[in-house]
Image: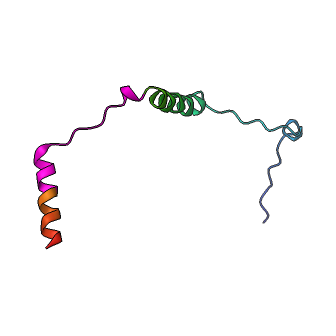
């Protein structure tokens, strides 16, 4: 018993590609690009994270122990 094959309708063979993207598929990359561009152009707004002194002291202690 053979299975029936499904052929696309004749209108689908026009030669053009009909791909529709959701609005956010273009909006999210544009938003990310603009955000990074703003950070590059105005680096004063990109503040460096300050480390907790306890974490810094712990890392220094680990480094000293590893050097021995």
Q: Residue pushed farthest bottom?
A: 68
In this rendering, the answer to whether 49 lies above or below 3 is: above
Question: Is 14 left, or right, of 50 in this rendering?
Answer: right
In this rendering, the answer to whether 54 lies above or below 21 is: below
Question: Is 1 left, or right, of 64 in this rendering?
Answer: right
Image-quadrant location for residue 13: top right
Question: Percent x, y for residue 29?
Answer: 55, 34
Tally of marks: 0
Image-quadrant location for residue 11: top right
**Most foreground residue, 31 or 14:** 31
Indicate the colouring scheme: rainbow
In this rendering, the answer to whether 15 lies above or below 23 is: below
Which residues are the magenta region? 43-59
- Residue, x 32% and y 31% (percent of image)? 47
Image-quadrant location for residue 46: top left
**Most foreground residue, 19 or 68:** 68
- Residue, x 79% and y 50% (percent of image)? 6
Q: Is residue 53 magenta?
A: yes
Considering the image in quadrants, where does the N terminus appear? bottom right
Question: Percent x, y for residue 24?
Answer: 55, 29
Question: Percent x, y for residue 59?
Answer: 16, 56
Considering the image in quadrants, where does the C terminus appear? bottom left
Question: Is 65 left, or right, of 16 in this rendering?
Answer: left
Question: Percent x, y for residue 36?
Answer: 48, 33
């Amino acid at each position: 018993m053979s299975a029936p094959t499904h052929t696309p309708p004749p209108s689908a063979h026009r030669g053009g590609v009909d791909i529709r993207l959701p609005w956010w598929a273009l909006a999210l990359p544009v938003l990310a690009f603009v955000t990074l561009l703003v950070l590059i152009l105005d680096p004063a707004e990109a503040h460096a994270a300050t480390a907790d002194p306890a974490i810094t002291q712990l890392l220094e202690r680990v480094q000293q122990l590893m050097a021995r």
